[in-house]
């Protein structure tokens, strides 16, 4: 039977053979293609890296019972929180973008060997949805309208989208969970953690907006959760070292050494306004309405009022299961 529109699905043409002349006949011999050689080389290199503990573990890391994780959906304030904690826990160290992943350990960017050698208790960072193995979690949440805006600019910085890409097209993708390096939407991430842990002693819920309004108060809450008892001046010093201005200076000097920004555009800063509520002036009304319509009940429970001002709800001790049925 002939195929008039090309070979059938799944059909693979045989690899071409090289030939050489041998007297009166031509002998064909199989030649390993470059496409076959490169993956084999990569597998050998990957195997050597794994044997030496130089590979990253991501979600597969071995967790210790006294580990604490700083967790958030991408662009919700994780890096700032990590700087605050690092400057509090390591007051004699100069915390920069070059070493932040070694101080607040990032299993997605540092080798297994570093994680294994780190003394306990460790503080680690994560952007994953609910992971039941995490013993203690500092969960940072941010208004999704600001998260959408921050991710938009971060993806311009990462060269995923161009400067002319319409933000009106970005927000629908954000709502579907298609804009983060890690899978899932803002709502899926937040509800995965709050339905499992809210109200339990092994989860500390922080809002980015509260950090922005009173960083010393919120860092004191973090210190208590970490079973630390710092003096007020130590907290004030950590906050000062982690200010937006200081982080912008550190970004200019060391961001090229940080895995998150080393291959990104230099003309777009990682540390932008470092303020809450930028969505009010930068998001189009239709985009704001789309986010509020999709996630309004959850936003209100977290204290993020819709722009219309309708509906009021605050945080309670228990995360309302009824929110699980909300749109998206």
Image (cartoon, rainbow, N blue to C red):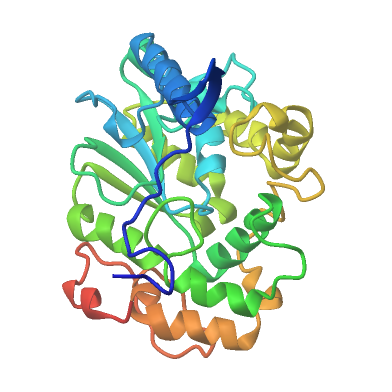
Quick check: can you spot residue 134?
A: yes
Which residue is nearer to you in this view: 146 or 46?
Answer: 46
Which residue is nearer to you in this view: 117 or 221?
Answer: 117
Which residue is nearer to you in this view: 102 or 200?
Answer: 102
Q: Quadrant of residue 251?
A: top right
When the figure is inspected, residue 214 is found, relative to residue 259, above or below; the finding is: below
Q: Quadrant of residue 148?
A: bottom right
When the figure is inspected, residue 161 is found, relative to residue 71, above or below; the finding is: below
Q: Quarter of the image containing the C terminus?
A: bottom left
Q: Position of residue 325 (x, y in %)?
A: 22, 79
Residue at position x 40%, y 12% in the image? 48
Q: Quarter of the image containing the N terminus?
A: bottom left
Q: Position of residue 162 (x, y in %)?
A: 73, 62
Determine the residue located farthest toward the right in the rendered image: 267
When the figure is inspected, residue 246 is found, relative to residue 7, above or below; the finding is: above
Across the whole image, how many numbered discs are drawn on residues?
A: 0
Residue at position x 34%, y 10% in the image? 51
Residue at position x 57%, y 82% in the image? 287
When the figure is inspected, residue 328 is found, relative to residue 121, above or below; the finding is: below
Residue 225 horizontal side relative to residue 305, left or right: left
Q: Position of residue 323 (x, y in %)?
A: 25, 76
Q: Position of residue 11 (x, y in %)?
A: 34, 56
């Amino acid at each position: 039977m002939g195929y008039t529109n090309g070979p059938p699905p799944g059909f693979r043409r045989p690899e071409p053979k090289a030939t050489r002349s041998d007297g009166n006949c031509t002998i064909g011999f199989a030649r390993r293609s470059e496409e076959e050689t490169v993956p084999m080389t990569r597998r050998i290199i990957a195997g050597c890296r794994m044997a030496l503990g130089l590979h990253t573990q991501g979600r597969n890391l071995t967790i210790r019972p006294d580990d604490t994780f700083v967790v958030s959906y991408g662009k919700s304030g994780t890096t700032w929180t990590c700087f605050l904690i690092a400057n509090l826990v390591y007051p004699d160290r100069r915390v920069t973008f070059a070493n932040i992943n070694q101080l607040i350990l990032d299993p997605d960017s540092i080798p297994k060997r570093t994680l294994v050698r780190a003394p306990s208790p460790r503080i680690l960072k994560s952007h994953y949805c609910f992971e039941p193995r995490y013993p203690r979690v500092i969960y940072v949440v941010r208004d999704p309208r600001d998260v959408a805006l921050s991710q938009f600019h971060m993806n311009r910085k990462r060269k995923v989208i161009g400067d002319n890409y319409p933000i009106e097209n970005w927000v629908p993708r954000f709502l579907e969970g298609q804009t983060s390096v890690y899978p899932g939407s803002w709502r899926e991430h937040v509800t995965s953690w709050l339905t499992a842990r809210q109200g339990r002693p092994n989860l500390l819920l922080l809002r980015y907006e509260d950090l922005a309004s009173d960083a010393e108060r919120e860092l004191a809450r973090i210190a208590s959760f970490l079973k630390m008892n710092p003096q007020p001046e130590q907290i004030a010093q950590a906050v000062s070292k982690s200010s937006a201005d200081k982080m912008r200076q550190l970004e200019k000097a060391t961001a090229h050494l940080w895995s998150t920004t080393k291959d990104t555009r230099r003309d777009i800063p990682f540390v932008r306004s470092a303020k809450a509520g930028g969505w009010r002036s930068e998001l189009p009304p239709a985009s704001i309405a789309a986010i509020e319509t999709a996630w309004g009940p959850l936003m209100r429970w977290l204290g993020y009022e819709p722009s219309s001002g309708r509906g009021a709800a605050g945080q309670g001790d228990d995360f309302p299961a009824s929110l699980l049925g909300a749109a998206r």
